[in-house]
Amino acid sequence: MPDGIWTRVEIGLNALAVDPAGLGGLWLRARSGPVRDRVIEALPALPLPLKRLHPSIGDEQLFGGIDLTATLSSGKLVERAGLLAEPAILVLPMAERTQPGLAARLAGALDQGTGHCLVAMDEGAEPQETLPEALTDRLALHLDLDALPWGQTERIAMDGDALAAARARLPGVRAGDKVLEDLTILAVRLGIDSLRAPMLALKAAKALAALAGNDEVDQDDLSAAVQLVLAPRATQFPEEEPDEDEQPPQDPPPPDPDPEQNQNDQDEGESQSLDDLPLQDILLEAAKATLPADLLANLAAQKAQRAGGGISGAGAKRKGNRRGRPIPPRRGRLDTGARLDVISTLRAAAPWQTIRKRESSFERSLHIRTDDFRIKRFEEKSDRLLIFVVDASGSAAMTRLAEAKGAVELLLAEAYARRDHVALVAFRGEAAELLLPPTRSLVQTKRRLAALPGGGGTPLAAGLKTALELAIQSKGRGMTPTVALLTDGRANIALDGTANRTMATEDATRMATAIRANGYPAMVIDMGQRPERSLKALAETLGAPYIPLPRADADRLSTAVSAALDA
């Protein structure tokens, strides 16, 4: 296969036009623009009708349901077919917003083998904004066009006659006995866990062979299929196989070879072509040629974020019955303050009208029972609140308070850009003080921070207690709080204000346990000159990451905290 992303796009679309149901579909990651439009222009060449889906489409639109208007006007049950009733090219724009429920339904439709093909338009701006894995695993072709300039694209030409001939030839295309085994081993070496990937690669190779007019899959077809299907899924650089020739010889060295024989062997080695190499090595070289330099780093970052579960406290999803994005209604009762979804309720009651009229002694045009009630539901994201708990004690003021102030200012600016709420708690002397309630005012926050004095003892427990109380209040107002503690960790003032280091440590541990028990994410930044063991233990009690930054300035502090928040 020639190099170039756009070449792979053209070859991939032609393969998809030959076997759309077998390949499952296309995951196209690209922002809306002329580059993506050129791909969309080629979709009508696929041999199935195009149907557009919405990321929040309901079950009735997918699987069909009651045609309410026709049922009420005719007095008979009239059903309406859903979008999945007939095989189609399902085009899903804004695919990164697909909810897990819809992803599961679409994945089930693809697994049933009813002839559907999904083209998912992923417009995610961040690595974590992407199509659910349940769908990416089932779509053979993965294409990322975000970095592709318009000047490197051309209009995609699709030969209808050639595609029709390839579709007719496809059932008779064969592959060698060991081809699937080689593809599976190659997938393992690339760090691909899914067993669907090598099977989809084999189907892609057969489609390309049919397109080339061949009855058997050859090496070029497999190389192209590897670049289209396996390379975009790679999660690791393939490790080189250990060279047996490098092992220390265990047996006595063989006698010197015959010079004439040695010359013949050397000639054979120099004349060895690519065709003489094992198929796995050839396919591996094809996959390596397609791997972008930063692809694996991005994949690793995404995997780390999924594994870590996130400590960012990013706005949590929550369901309600008043505000937010509408989601499919559910059966429910009206005595809980819920809102009735009239249309869904009528649809639920429509199939039973004939039976209920026979059983009822009252003449009514509609018979609706409580089991028919469908309740409106909405989903919204709560605002994130970053609670900065800053140590302004004498020990901190002598060492790192200035850097901590600078770091907090930088973090506040980033939080302001993300439209997060911020709050500031300072502890010094014998108590803690809420210097700044939750706000989005950057100017006010900076003013309060600049006026923060330093000195006195370290009432760490009081600072954590104030942060906990603020987090509870904020959660009650619909926010998702995260606690960021910046201290040198030398707690010496207990909650009652007495100077007792032992009691101060016990109180701080108790407050940290309470914060963790309430489920609030947190992080601990050790800004002392040396890492403090007690502070690391406190981070473990909080279930929070511990970030020791003994020689960091404000920029490094800010960068480290931002990385922890975004992880």
Image (cartoon, rainbow, N blue to C red):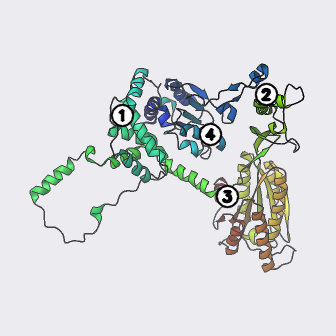
Q: Is residue 294 visible?
A: no
Per the image, the residue denoted by label 4 is 105
Distance of label 1 from label 2 (alpha carbons): 55 Å
Counting from the top left corner in percent of width and height, residue 563 is at 63, 55
Counting from the top left corner in percent of width and height, residue 215 is at 33, 32
Residue at 84% over, 71% down: 429
Q: Please say if the residues under marks 4 and 2 sit with CB atoms less than 8 Å apart.
A: no
Is 542 rendered above or below residue 182?
A: below
Question: Callout 2: 10 Å neighbours few (<14), some, many (20+)?
Answer: some
Per the image, the residue denoted by label 1 is 173
Q: Which mark is residue 354?
A: 2
Q: Quadrant of the C terminus?
A: bottom right
Left or right of 261 in this view: 64:
right
Q: Please say if the residues under marks 4 and 3 sit with CB atoms less than 8 Å apart.
A: no
Q: Which mark is residue 561?
A: 3
Determine whether the residue tagged by mark 2 lies in a helix, strand or loop: helix
Determine whether the residue tagged by mark 4 lies in a helix, strand or loop: helix
Name which of mark 1 and mark 4 comes first in the sequence.
4
Foreground disc of the pair 1, 2: 2
Amino acid at dot 2 = Thr
Task: Report which quarter residue 242 is drawn in.
Answer: bottom left
Foreground disc of the pair 2, 3: 2
Question: Callout 3: 10 Å neighbours few (<14), some, many (20+)?
Answer: many
Amino acid at dot 3 = Val
Question: Callout 4: 10 Å neighbours few (<14), some, many (20+)?
Answer: some
In this rendered view, identify the residue nearer to me: 543 or 367.
367
